[in-house]
Amino acid sequence: MKDLDDIPALMASIGARARAASAELAYASPEAKARALHAAANAVEAQSDRIIAANADDLVFGRDKGLSEAMMDRLTLTEDRVAGIAASLRAVADQQDPVGGVIASWDMPSGLQIERVRTPLGVVGVIYESRPNVTADAGALCLKAGNAVILRGGSESFHSSSAIHACMVEGLEAAGLPLDSIQLVPTRDRAAVTEMLTMTDTIDVIVPRGGKGLVGLVQREARVPVFAHLEGIVHIYLDAAADADTAMKVVMNAKTRRTGICGAAECLLIHRDVADTLGRDVIRALIEAGVTVYADETLAAIEGTEPAGDDDWGREYLDMKIAARVVDDIDDAITHVRRYGSSHTDCIITEDTSARDRFFQRLDSAILMHNASTQFADGGEFGMGAEIGIATGKMHARGPVGAEQLTSFKYLVRGAGTVRP
C-alpha cells in the first residue's frame, strides 16, 4: 500500500491493481463468484458484533458532524440491517450470472453467425455517502458482473465500511479470486475523490451515490463516464378515480416508511375533484403522522399545513416533509412533474386504466408506478438482489443498476472461411 499522504500515488496503485484484477474476473467462473459472495455473507454474519461496534464509532462521528436524522438513519446499522446485508449478498450470489449471456443472435446471408453477448465493463468506481451497506451491495454487484470495483465510502461511514469490506475480501480469498477485485480507499481525504474522477486509464465508469452536492460535483468534474441521479424528487398523483384505501396506504408508506431514501415521496399532486375529500383526508393523515405539509393556496385552508413557497416545488426533503398542490387534471399533473421532477420515480394512484396509461406514456421517468409505494424504487425490490444506485440518465443504464446493468456487450462473429465479395 502506498503512503496515505501521497494520494495520487495511492490512487494510481489502487487503479492499476483493480485493472489487473478485472482482467482475471472477466473470465472467472460463475461458481467462483457465487462462492465468494456466499463466503462474504457468512463472514458478515460471523462479524456482526464487530461491524456494529465499528458503526457505533461512525455514529459518534456523524453526530459530531451534525448529520440530519435522515442521514443518521442511513448510517445506522442494527442486527437486522447487518442480517439484511448478508441476505443481499446471498441474493446476488444466487442470481443468474450475466457475463457471457447471449443478448441476441442471428445468421446473415453471407454465412456469418453473429451473437451479441454480455461482457464486463472492467473497473467501476463507486463514491458514496453515509450508507455502509453500499460497500457490500456495490462490491457484490460489480463482482457478479465480472468487474473490479474501487469503493470510496463517505467519511462518516469509514469504520463500518472498513469492517464490511474486510468480509468481502474474506469471501474473495475463500473463492481464490484476486483480492484486489474489491478495494476500499483507505483514507477520508477528499483528494482521493478528485483523483478517481480523472483516472481514465484505470476506471471505466463512476457511480456516485449520495446527496445533490456529491453527485453534482461528480457530474461536473468527472472525466470518466458517470451513472448517476442528482435527486429523487418523487411525485405521487392522486387521480380523480383514485381508490381511497389505496391512496391512504400508498401515500403514507411512500412518505413515512423511511424518509431518507431516494424513493421517498416528496410532492403530492391532487386532482381538483377530490381535493376537498380524499385529498383533505390524506393530508390530515400525513400531519397526524408528524409530516409537515407545505400546501398550495387551495390546500392551505387545511388545519396544520404550512404555506408552500416557490422553492418547495422540485425539492428533495429527505425528511418528514412533503409539498402538496391541487392540479386541474392529469395533464396538469404531468406538466408539473415534467417541470419539477428529476426523472427518478413518479406514481399515479387511480382505478382508471386510461389515466394510468396516459401517465405511463407521457412521462419519461426512470421508474413509473401505479397504485404502489414509491419506496419500492429499489434494486432489491426489483429482484436484482441489490442495487448500486438508481440511474436517471438515458445512456446505457437506467433505473436500478444491478449486475446486468454493470455489463456491456461484444459481438462474436463465426464463419467458415467466409470472405466478403
Image (cartoon, rainbow, N blue to C red):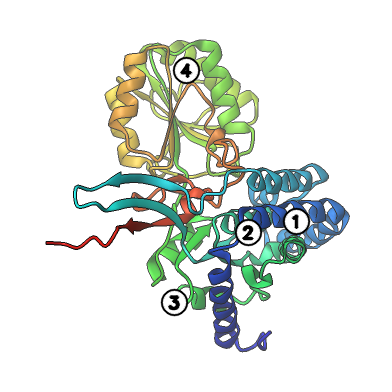
Q: Are marks 4 and 3 in contact (CB under 8 Å)?
A: no
Which residue occupies 53% across, 73% down?
193
Q: Position of residue 347 (x, y in %)?
A: 44, 28
Splitting the image into 4 quarters, where does residue 170 fall?
bottom right
Q: Amino acid at mark 1?
A: Ala
Task: Find the distance from the CA under tag 2 to the CA under tag 1.
Answer: 10 Å
Task: Find the distance from the CA under tag 4 to the CA under tag 3.
Answer: 49 Å
Query: Relative to residue 224, is residue 52 drawn left or right?
Result: right
Query: Relative to residue 32, is residue 125 drawn left or right?
Result: left
Task: Judge depth for marks 1 and 4 and give the one in front.
Answer: 1
Q: Position of residue 137 (x, y in %)?
A: 63, 52
Q: Amino acid at mark 4?
A: Gly
User: Which residue bears the numbered disc 3?
Assistant: 198
| Disc 1 residue crowd, few under 14, some 14–19, many 20+, Cα 10 Å | many
User: Which residue bears the numbered disc 1?
Assistant: 40
Task: Judge depth for marks 2 and 4 and give the one in front.
Answer: 2
Disc marking residue 139: 2
User: Which residue bears the numbered disc 4?
Assistant: 279
Task: Judge depth for marks 2 and 3 and give the one in front.
Answer: 2
Q: Is residue 337 above or below residue 158?
A: above
| Disc 3 residue crowd, few under 14, some 14–19, many 20+, Cα 10 Å | some
| Disc 2 residue crowd, few under 14, some 14–19, many 20+, Cα 10 Å | many
Task: Find the distance from the CA under tag 2 to the CA under tag 4.
Answer: 43 Å
Q: Are marks 2 and 1 in contact (CB under 8 Å)?
A: yes
For the view shown, which residue lies furthest in the left direction?
Answer: 421
- For marks 1 and 3, the one nearer the N-term is 1
Is residue 131 visible in the rendered structure shown here? no
